[in-house]
Amino acid sequence: MPANPCSGRFDLAVVGAGIIGLATALAAVQRRLKVIVIDRDAQANGASVRNFGFVTISGQQRGSMWARARRSRDVWREIADAAGIAIVHTGLWMTARRPEAVGVLEAFMTTEMADGCRLLTPAEARRRCPQLLAPQLAAVLESSGELRVESRQAIPRLAAWLAGTHGVSFLRDTAVLAIDTPDLQTSSGSVHADRVVVCPGDDFNGLYAQRLQAYALTRCKLQMLRLSDPGFRLPAALMSDLGIGRYPGYAELPAAAPLKERLALEQPQQLAHGVHLIVVQSADGSLVVGDSHHYADTPDPFSQQAVDDLILDEFRLALGIEPPPVVERWIGTYASASDRPVLIDAPSPSVRIVIVTCGAGASTGFAIGEEVMNSLLDTGVHA
Ligand SMILES: Cc1cc2nc3c(=O)[nH]c(=O)nc-3n(C[C@H](O)[C@H](O)[C@H](O)COP(=O)(O)OP(=O)(O)OC[C@H]3O[C@@H](n4cnc5c(N)ncnc54)[C@H](O)[C@@H]3O)c2cc1C
């Protein structure tokens, strides 16, 4: 009979098997800790498998988020082969069609964040990708640092690798109900661990709910589409003017002010629904396209055709082609806070709560996991 996976005492229990929980588990086993990961779902079902799998560097907020993204990208690269995770494609093409958007890209190129980036003329871009027909294309910022994984495969493979190669125990279909280290009360009985990291995604009404009320958290709902194979390969992930006006690495530059004014005049519907364009490609050629941003404490679960149409309009403008047929639609939600990109809280010396509050967990999670483990081990809670 197999040993009960939750018997014995662990150095660390991680609550939540999304990317943040798995990244924390990886950082812990690299520090030789005995780890158990507990999740209430039978398999990953949250933001971590609903996202683009797009590990973005340029566009991340200048400073610590940009640095976290670079570190996390390096970890994705380091573990991908061993964990059987395919890097489906690399790089980003940030396309600009308005002069104001080109102005932001030029300003971006003068910052340290332009490391690995270059500006392409429309002619250069079309030579590399003749199918990019957008008549208004004015410039492309090519960034080489990004990569893309197929999250719905990558997350289960990362978990399987942590279990098989690194001996991490997984307890699924199990909600953690209360924590008083070293005791965790779960829906499957007690678990014992000296330290706990809670990575609950956008579930902030459960564990430590009262404590989390201090953080003004809300949820963001996103609409996502999969389009069938357009019949050609994208040179990289693709974004457009709306992304330049939204992603903080660009949008917080002073040069972005004229672009934001023009977008408010010309694309008010897109701004009202938080629409901007990301297009990434899967191994079978299909395109994952999004997205929109609607904020509410409990977002409704319904996908609106009118919002999908706004996303597809931007696709037409940015790529200059008719979008291929939609083959799949879904929504996802993530935790959001207007005053910080990441929340790391310490309810006790042996416990951390970690929530990415800016929709960039796939891009920054591995670095955050390392920071959290360093902070936990620095507090002197040693088994
Ligand atoms: C549509 C969409 C597109 C996105 N695109 C990108 C992108 O391209 N790049 C990027 O970097 N980021 C992207 N993001 C953001 C990114 O997906 C999230 O930041 C990240 O997945 C958050 O990971 P997580 O582990 O915190 O949360 P989750 O993946 O939601 O995992 C949390 C887990 O905790 C479990 N849990 C919670 N409470 C308990 C409990 N008490 N007991 C047991 N289990 C519990 C849940 O069951 C869940 O499995 C996107 C998000 C969405 C929704």
Image (cartoon, rainbow, N blue to C red):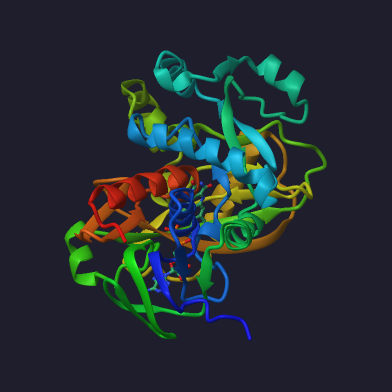
In this rendering, the answer to whether 62 lies above or below 123 is below
Question: Can residue 154 be seen at all in this image of the molecule?
Answer: yes
Residue situated in front as seen by the camera: 241 or 198: 198
Question: Can residue 314 be seen at all in this image of the molecule?
Answer: no
Task: Report the residue at 23% width, 51% height from top.
Answer: 379
Identify the image quadrant of the N terminus. bottom right
Residue situated in front as seen by the camera: 225 or 13: 13
Residue 190 locus on image (x, y percent): 37, 83
Task: Report the residue at 41% width, 18% height from top.
Answer: 112
In this rendering, the answer to whether 260 lies above or below 35 is above
In this rendering, the answer to whether 349 lies above or below 63 is below
143 left or right of 252 in image: right
115 left or right of 347 in image: right
Residue 50 locus on image (x, y percent): 56, 59
Residue situated in front as seen by the camera: 381 or 203: 381
Going by the picture, which residue comes out furthest to the front?
Answer: 383
Give the quarter of the image for residue 154.
Answer: bottom right
Residue 239 locus on image (x, y percent): 56, 35
Residue 121 locus on image (x, y percent): 63, 14
Identify the image quadrant of the C terminus. bottom left
11 left or right of 125 in image: left
Task: Report the residue at 33% width, 46% height from top.
Answer: 374
142 left or right of 261 in image: right
